[in-house]
Amino acid sequence: MTFSIAKNTLCALGLFATAIAAIQPVYAENKAALLPIIQTNYDRINAAFVRKDVKGATAYFTPDYVSINPKGEKQNLEAFRSHYNTVLNRFNIKLTSNKTTIKDLTVSPTGIDVSIVQQTEGTIAGFNKIVISQTSKNFWLKTPQGWRLKQSNILTNQTTFNGKVFND
């Protein structure tokens, strides 16, 4: 009887390992196929921010989007839009470049986790140089409109103003 249980357990483990091995290439294929789609979405978001088109940039966000800064403070989509409209227009910021580099992309049954490095450069009032560097872990969700950004966890953030570090 014990031999039969052990045999059945080994057989079940073998089938489980075979199933896992069969699933892994699917995730790898999805990752390879999804990477350019997500990068294109980041590129479109970044281009819209350079144009000061906050609504266009956030068109790639879910309605329940939330941004979490390194201090753990949360900002919903409406507050995020309001903040960036104010910052870009009130302080006469002109972005000259805005680039996202994907460091890692992990596919799961619920969505995609993406680790990124963001580098934004621009000027304030036409001559003061500002550079913002941050790392984030973002969660993308498949929607009927395509892949949309649901949550951004900003892990690190550094701003330089005319070459000097300035963080709040």
Image (cartoon, rainbow, N blue to C red):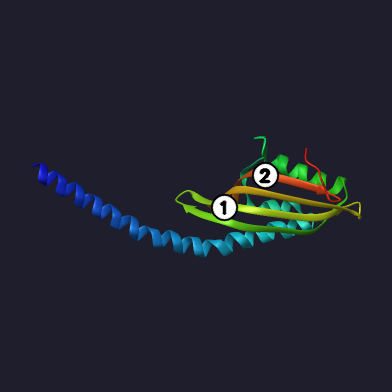
- Can residue 144 be seen here? The reply is no
Q: In this view, does 82 lie above or below 17?
A: above
Residue annotated with mark 2: 156
* Residue 31 in the image, given as x and y percentages of width and height: 49, 60
Q: Is residue 146 above or below residue 9?
A: below
Q: Residue at x 69, y 49 (%)?
A: 134
Q: For this view, does 22 lie left or right of residue 122?
A: left
Disc number lying in front (1 or 2): 2
Q: Which residue lies furthest to the front in this view?
A: 164
Q: Residue 32 carries which label?
A: none
Q: Residue at x 28, y 52 (%)?
A: 16
Q: Which residue is drawn at 14% across and 44% down?
A: 5
- Can residue 142 be seen here? The reply is yes
Q: Which residue lies furthest to the left in this view?
A: 1
Give residue 18's quadrant in the image: bottom left
Crowding at mark 2 (Cα within 10 Å: few <14, some 14-19, many 20+): few
Residue annotated with mark 1: 114
Separation of residues labelled 1 and 2 (CA atoms) = 15 Å
* Residue 92 in the image, given as x and y percentages of width and height: 88, 50
- Residue type at mark 1 is Val
Q: Quick one: label 1 or label 2, which is nearer the N terminus?
A: 1
- Residue type at mark 2 is Thr
Crowding at mark 1 (Cα within 10 Å: few <14, some 14-19, many 20+): many
* SS of the residue under disc 1: strand
* Residue 114 in the image, given as x and y percentages of width and height: 57, 52
Quadrant that contains the N terminus: top left
* SS of the residue under disc 2: strand
| Relative depth, front residue between 93 and 135 | 135
* Residue 156 in the image, given as x and y percentages of width and height: 67, 44
